[in-house]
Amino acid sequence: MTSLMGIELDELDAAVCGAAPDERASDGHAMDGHAMDGGLGGPLARKVHAVSLVGAGPGDPELLTVRALKRLQQADVVLTDDLVDPRVLACLPASARVLRVGKRGGCVSTEQRFIHELMIREARAGARVVRLKGGDPFVFGRGGEEADALREAGMAVEVVNGVSAGLAAPASVAVPITDRRCTPGVAFVTGHNGEHGRAPDWAALAQSRLTLVIYMGLSRAAFIASALQAGGLSADTPAVAISAAHTPHQRDCFSTLGHLAADIALAQLPSPALLVIGEVVALSPQWRQWWDADATRASVQAWSSGA
């Protein structure tokens, strides 16, 4: 039996599924991919399906691609991230086993190597395996690492792209991430480079004139804003933080770079959230409404202080 970090795969798989190992093995799925040879003791190999790395999009199941929906409906085993919307999981067949292997900042997370081992084991057993990730699997989703691990194990890999939050979240508040009147392009950046990751060059980004779409940056908003201003980006640059885009819990916080962290704290905006910084934010009618209201408040406060 394969083990990882001192934990038997069968035991951890059962714990994730909420079933005992014997219960899980008797549900029929684990045996679908192979048959015994009639008593000689060796398995007769059945077809090993390609493992599908599927993007679940930002939340709303109507934003799934047609191919993603097909793969979900065909799945035997689904390894899902925490950020996948429950409405997307509701698209799965009742027979599918759902293994929750998410990673969240500040929480106990599933070891990446274990995820690799689990995908390989289930696929070799003949299951149709879907690795389901919020957004797009190749945009800050470790999809590249997982594809490499599968290929090294001799497995075929299919990548099914999803609508990334970096596109969908700004659009949900009417922010076009590119507009030739404001910017020559857009940069998708991680605000949390994590273990063995490379930190962004905030000074270079500040000078780039690009729209900055920052993933996993909510808890570091103060640092990011300070680094960008130190690199020359104006404190008056329009900005917005968008939490839980395209879900029933979506919230946003419009601001400027210099006040973004304080406004996020005041609004108590929860993660997961995306930061968008750049002149394009001012093209949103919602930002202009916020700006007018903020200017009115400032005028009232100045008048009150003078009185």
Image (tube, rainbow, N blue to C red):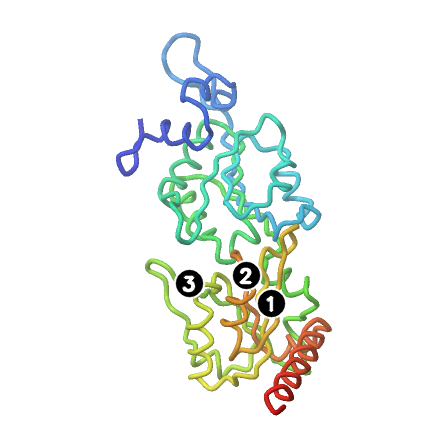
The residue singled out by tag 3 in the image is 192
Residue 99, horizontal then vertical, whole percent: 48, 35
Q: Earlier in the sequence, mark 2 or mark 3?
A: 3
**Is 11 situated left or right of 238 in this image?**
left
Which of pointers 2 and 1 lies earlier in the amino acid sequence?
A: 1
Whether the residues at callouts 2 and 1 have beta carbons within 8 Å, the answer is yes
Residue sticking out furthest to the bottom:
306
Residue ID at (41%, 18%) = 22
Q: Residue at x 45, y 31 (%)?
A: 122
How far apart marks 3 and 1 lie (CA) works out to 20 Å
Mark 2 highlights which residue?
A: 269
Total numbered labels: 3
Amino acid at circle 2: Leu
First in residue order: circle 3 vs circle 1? 3
- The one nearer the camera, 284 or 266, is 266
Q: Residues within 10 Å of mark 3 (few under 14, many from 20)?
A: some
Q: Gap between marks 2 and 1, in whole Å?
A: 8 Å
Indicate the secondary structure of the residue bearing disc 3. Answer: loop
Q: Which mark is residue 253?
A: 1
- Image position, residue 108 (x, y; %): 38, 45
